[in-house]
Amino acid sequence: MAAAASLGASAPGSASLACGYEDPQSVSRGSLSWGYPNSLHVIGAISTEVAARRLPHANFNRGGVDLFGNKFRLASKSLEQFGTMLSATSSESLQTPVAIVLLEPMLWARFEPTAGGLRTAVHVSGAKDGDLVVVTGEAVIAEIAAGHLTFGEAYARGVARLYGEDAQIAAFVQNYQQVGADLGVLETGPSRTAAGLNLQNRPAAQQTGTTSHRFMWRKSCEC
């Protein structure tokens, strides 16, 4: 943890705010797992889903030169739509700020409840103390934003992991598992109930999300 902190302190400001869409060579995910144990397991889970054709390839990983930043705009739009869905899906207002990182480009976004509603900020430097952290992939968020996948399904399949206090994690899964469902038909079906996402059945690494197991990854990240 101390090494990660010193890395962040020594990194130039421009590098700390660059993400993989701007400089693909700068992307480094290894240190993320110091603060969020086993978070890189999400990459393997995503690969499995892509191989089974349950997820598309991430735009970030597709070939070709992205001269006009279209890949970033697509990811940003998906994250903004995710924030809109957070506001619309649950009758419970979001109580805890949520930070999310897309692993392929190491792009961070943050969703913060305010008096005027949920505020979405894309391309931030990382999570803040007390945030609930979501580690996932670009294609996962794109599929949720498009209504092809619910957050509950993504969580159950391991392509999204949550880090925070256990109570925060349980409340978020309960209240926002339907994010990504058709907002016109949000009745809870048997395959998407909280019982189907029993926290006791999740991987052990996802159960140990208390503050003592987290190192807040800020300026040392690529985005």
Image (spheres, rainbow, N blue to C red):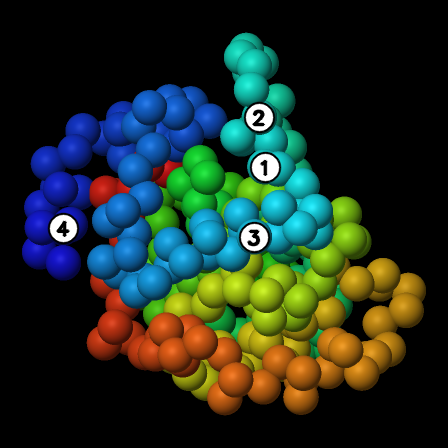
Q: Earlier in the sequence, mark 1 or mark 3?
A: 3
Q: Position of residue 12 (x, y in %)?
A: 18, 29
Looking at the image, tell me whether mark 3 or mark 4 is earlier in sequence order: 4
Please, what is the three-letter code of the amino acid marked with disc 2? Arg
Disc 2 to disc 1: CB gap under 8 Å: yes
Say what amino acid the circle numbered 4 marks.
Ala
Q: Earlier in the sequence, mark 3 or mark 2?
A: 3
Q: What residue do we see at 16% from left, 33% from top? A: 11
Q: Is residue 217 visible?
A: yes
Label 2: element kind: loop
- Gap between marks 2 and 1, in whole Å? 7 Å
Q: Quadrant of the C terminus?
A: top left
Disc 1 and disc 4: Cα gap in Å?
A: 30 Å
Please indicate, yes or no, whether residue 141 appears anywhere in the rendered image. Answer: no
To which residue does mark 1 refer?
Answer: 58
Label 1 element class: loop
Q: Nearer the viewer, residue 181 or 43?
A: 43
Residue under the point 46% across and 53% down: 44
The residue where tag 4 is placed is 5
Tag 3 residue = 48
CA–CA distance in space, label 3 to label 2: 17 Å
Q: Viewer-nearest of labels 3 and 2? A: 3
Q: Which residue, given by chain and number where applicable, does mark 2 sit on? A: 62
Q: Indicate which label's residue lies in the foreground, 1 or 3.
A: 3
Instruction: Give the mark toward the camera: 1 or 4.
Output: 1
Decide if residue 100 is on the left or right side of residue 75. Answer: left
From this view, report whether residue 210 is shown above or below residue 84. below
Measured in 3D between alpha carbons, the distance from the residue under mark 1 to the one under mark 3, in whole angstroms, is 13 Å
Quarter location, residue 118: bottom right
Quadrant for residue 88, please give it.
bottom right
